Structures are given as C-alpha cells and as structure tokens.
Image (cartoon, helix red, strand yellow):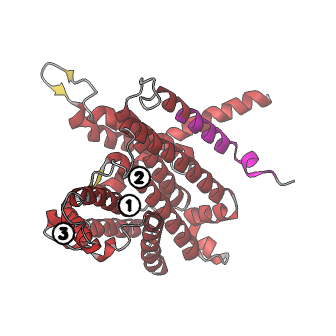
Amino acid sequence: MNRSFIARNPSVLVFLSLLALFTIMVTVLSEGFGIGIVSTSFVKTLGKTLCLCLIAVAMDLIWGYTGILSLGHFAFFGLGGYMIGIWLMYERTRQIVATSLSEGILPPTPEETEAAIANQIFGVVGSSEFPIVWAFSNSLVVQLILVVLVPGVFALIFGWLAFRSRVTGVYLSILTQAMTLGLSLYLFQNANGFRGNNGLSGLQNLPGVTAPQSVVSLWFFWASAVALGLGYLLTAWVVSGKFGSVIRGIRDNETRVRFLGYSVESYKLAVFTLTACISGIAGALYYPQAGIINPAELAPIASIYLAVWVAIGGRGRLYGAVIGTAFVSLVSSWSTGGQAPDISLGFYTIRWVDWWLVLLGLSFVLVTLFAPGGIGAIFDHLSRQSNGRGTS
C-alpha cells in the first residue's frame, strides 16, 4: 500500500507546523500588530534569517544530497536581489521624479520623465541613460519572472559547461567560487547598469505604499515564511522519491550510478538549476528587508559561510540546514550588533565583534572533527530514543 508523502515524511509536517507557530507568535508580538514586544528591526532580522534558511535548504539539496560542494550559490542569491531591486528603485524614483516635474509650468513629456529618472538613478556613476539590463524595469511582473529566470539560466549555462566536462570534487568547488568572484567583479564596474560599488539602495521603501515600516516588515516576514515553507516542501518532495535516491547515489558513488545507465550529468544539472532558482527567490525577499544590495554581497566568502551554516546544522538533513543557519545567523546578529557584552579578563577585553568569526571557524572545525552530523544529528538521536521507548 502506497502511503502519502506526509506519512512517509512526518518531519515535513512537524517543520511546517513549527514554522507556522513561529510566524504567528512573531506576528502577535510585533510592533506592526500592536503589542510591540518584538521590535520592527528584529522582525526584519527574523525575516532575513528565514530567507537565509531558504538558501541553506537549497545548499543542502546540492551539497548534502547530491554531493556537490558549490561555493557560488550566493551569486544566484544576489542576482535575485538585483532583479527585484531594479524594479523597486525604478518605481520609487519614478514617483519622486513625477511629483517634482508636476510642479513645473508645462507637464513633462514621457521622454523628459524617463531622462530625469535615468539621471536620478545613474548620475552617481556618471551616466544618464538606461542600460539594456533595465529594459523591463517598469514592469513588476517581468522583474519577478527574472528573479527566477536569470539565476536559473545562469546556473543552467554554467552547470552544462561544467558537468559535461565532468568536473567534480574540489575542482568544481573552485570553479563555482571563481564564477562568484567573476560576477562580483563584473558588478563592481560602473558601466554594466548595476551602479557599481553603490549598488541599489532604498529597497525597503515599497513604491506607492504608505504603511509604516512596522507593517511592511511584517509583510516581508510573512512572505519569507511562506517561501521557506514552500521551498522546504518542494525539496523534501524532491529527495523523497526516485529522483532523491538517484542523487544520493551520485553523492555516494557517481561511477556506479553512471554504470547503471543514469545520466549523471542531467541529474546534477537539474539540481544545480533548481537550487539556483530557489536561491534567487530567497535573495529577492532578503534584500528589500536589508534595504540595499551591492557587489560586496556576492563576495565568495558569503558562499563559504553558507557551507559552514549547513555543515554546523548537519548536511543531508533539510531541517538541519535550517537549524544551523538560524542559529548562526541570530548569534551573529547578537554578537556583531553590539548586544553581546564585552568580557574583561583584566589583561585583555574580549569583544565579540572581533572574535565572532574566529568562534564560527572553530565551531566548523569542531563539528567536522567530532560531530559530522551537526546539530541535526542531536534531533535524530532524540527521535530514535523516543521511538525506542514507544515500541518497547
């Protein structure tokens, strides 16, 4: 008898239930809802954390289940942020320019309005014309499609070139890191249409929305929670069936899977492209909450951090990736945001801002040496013990 997907994967229902409960609790306690125990800034932090958890789930699918250590998935994350950022910046600037020009004696022509918008956006990099990458900046629908399409196509082309050449292991990791570095350096150039080092700013201000930030932050928090829930459900479904068995086989013994007649390259390319699309959606939700995106966000070190988060949480466990990312992200915000008190030893004062990255690196080393299953393995152990008591 075939059991349902949820019956075969009870952890999915548990995760979605806990996520829903968490979302309701934060909403009720937020300033936007009225109680005000949870500040607006912390709601934004939680919303961004959920977005990071979503890209961590994608990372776990490509690394934990398929065995491909990609050090470039933050490039797809950033591309998704740039795609939605283009519309947010254009539309917000258009409204400001339209209001300013309407005060003139004669109404402006559409050409004059477009020229004023272009000058306002690109004057900082010495230009006054819209580049080709902004061709659909006035269409929210198109830019939302590009949030998925651009990272997906970019990953499809890169993956096809890499996998058809059968690049594997550390060489593929280096190649993905080089891809991220190359894209980051490209975005630093002023002439490419992404405003160089200045990036896109003011993304937290939704065009045409007069609601306070306390309410807007809740909207994005809800959207991030829904995206994480759907992303988790999708990836859990992918790894639960035959497709999941094949990619696990590729992770454990790629040569054997190829000899069994499976197109290993096609499976790798499908997972690589799917996870890039998920990463793009996560980035599109993250950067409006952060308020700004620039090329520094795509630096290779960000993708390395992502791998560390997944490793600490426990790769090969979707909930482990979420736990590890949420834990590290929130502790990082607490340590580097001035909330962690300094510890005076008399001869030396420990400042968490200076020591946080050292502790993160040390945690990664300790997990790798002594707890390769990560934090998620603890929950596995407790679950087995609970099941053992229940059946005895």
Residue 268 falls in image quadrant: bottom right
Three-letter amino acid code at the position of disc 3: Asn
User: Is residue 325 visible in the rendered structure shown here?
Assistant: no
Q: Report the number of numbered marks.
A: 3
Residue under pointer 2:
307
Q: Which residues are magenta?
A: 3-23
Q: Nearer the viewer, residue 215 or 44?
A: 215
Q: Residue at x 47, y 26 (%)?
A: 29
Residue 253 falls in image quadrant: bottom right
Q: Secondary structure at mark 1?
A: loop
- The reply to whether dot 2 and dot 3 touch (C-beta < 8 Å) is no
Could you say where residue 171 lies in the image, as x and y percent from the top left?
A: 38, 70
Residue under pointer 1:
71
User: Is residue 14 visible in the rendered structure shown here?
Assistant: yes
Q: Nearer the viewer, residue 349 or 217?
A: 217
Q: Residue at x 24, y 73 (%)?
A: 192
| Residue 185's disc number | none
